[in-house]
Amino acid sequence: MAAIRVGVNEGTGKIYSNVTLVTYGRGHFKGQGLDVELLETGSRRNTLPKLASGELDAAAQGPNYEFFTNWEPERPIAMVADHGSAQPGRGGPGGIVARPDLIKSGRLRDWADLKGLRVALSSRRYDHDWVTVGSALQRGGLTVDDLEIVTMDFGGGRHEALTNGTIDITTVDRPASIKEGEANGDFLVWKREWEIRPGRQQRVLMFSHRFRTERRDEAQRYATAYLAGLREYYNAFEHGINRDAIIAVLAEQCGDSREVVEATPPAGVNPDGRLNVEGIEEELRWYQDGGFLPSTIKVEGLVDYSFLDSAIAQLGEYRPPATAGRA
């Protein structure tokens, strides 16, 4: 049996593969008799083409611009289960960060206070930082025309620009970057993503067309193992069950320190693996309204719940620990 090739993030972004890493590290894949190989394929721009071609069997990525542009009707990638959404106190540490003096002075308090600020954004207007900042502006009755935009790639350059005053705000997502930036006094987090885009479906477990059609039995066992791992993850952070053990597994698998893992708000997950389809549709509309994607694309047909439904039939619908085992 060939190994199941699963793409995960690399470097300081590996923690965003959290539920997959817990499922792997806690032995759920082996429990289903599967040989799973985790490959650090990096960002969505590297991972999704590999998933579309069948070079990868599974991965957890966002239903973002790259997902829709790599989706092909002849060999469609499918979204099969939840891997994390933005919920109160959940969804990672990322969001909009600002120069500390803007927050401490009260210059930047509410959404409308964004007007006139200088923001660093990607040169690609469909990147997720544009979606995040655009959503924040909308909450204040503003548009991007109310900001001074400075084109800048993701990374340390944004930290430096905040420090020297070249920009006022930007987005930062990675936990290690948030921790470093705040410790160095480069910035303060102004709004988390769950405040800016509550309910946003951040990551989704996806299967390649080849995996779900040519290796369906293995794909089903993968989904069953994954649901068991997702529920362990959920119970750890929602109910405190085996929390220390899950944090230890995450630290070991992602390479971050235990302190970084503990300080990172966990992913908000549905213990039955259901997706926030409305949130996905909202994000798709943002791309379509901006002219980045055709209006003909519909979320219907991009989600395949057949594997998840079978996994739930086998494991049962989720019950909170206090009610587990009751008739």
Image (spheres, grey):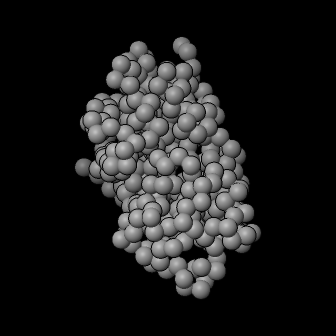
Which residue is painted at 28% across and 32% down in the image? 301
247 in relation to 182, above or below: above
Which residue is painted at 43% across and 76% down in the image? 112
246 in relation to 10, above or below: below
Image coordinates for residue 11, horizontal then vertical, percent: 68, 44
Question: How many labels, in total?
Answer: 0
Image coordinates for residue 47, horizontal then vertical, percent: 55, 33
Image coordinates for residue 223, horizontal then vertical, percent: 42, 32
Whether residue 182 is visible: no
**Front-lying residue, 161 or 189:** 161
Which residue is painted at 39% across and 72% down in the image? 140
**Image quadrant in which you'd find residue 36:** top right
Q: Is residue 266 left or right of residue 291?
A: right
Where the N terminus falls, by quadrant? top right
- Please identify the residue farthest to the bottom as the structure is shown: 105
Which residue is painted at 47% across and 25% down in the image? 52
Image coordinates for residue 267, horizontal then vertical, percent: 49, 53
**Front-lying residue, 288 or 246:** 288
34 in relation to 12, above or below: above
Whether residue 202 is visible: yes
**Image quadrant in which you'd find residue 30:** top right
**Front-lying residue, 28 or 305:** 305
Q: Is residue 184 left or right of residue 53?
A: right
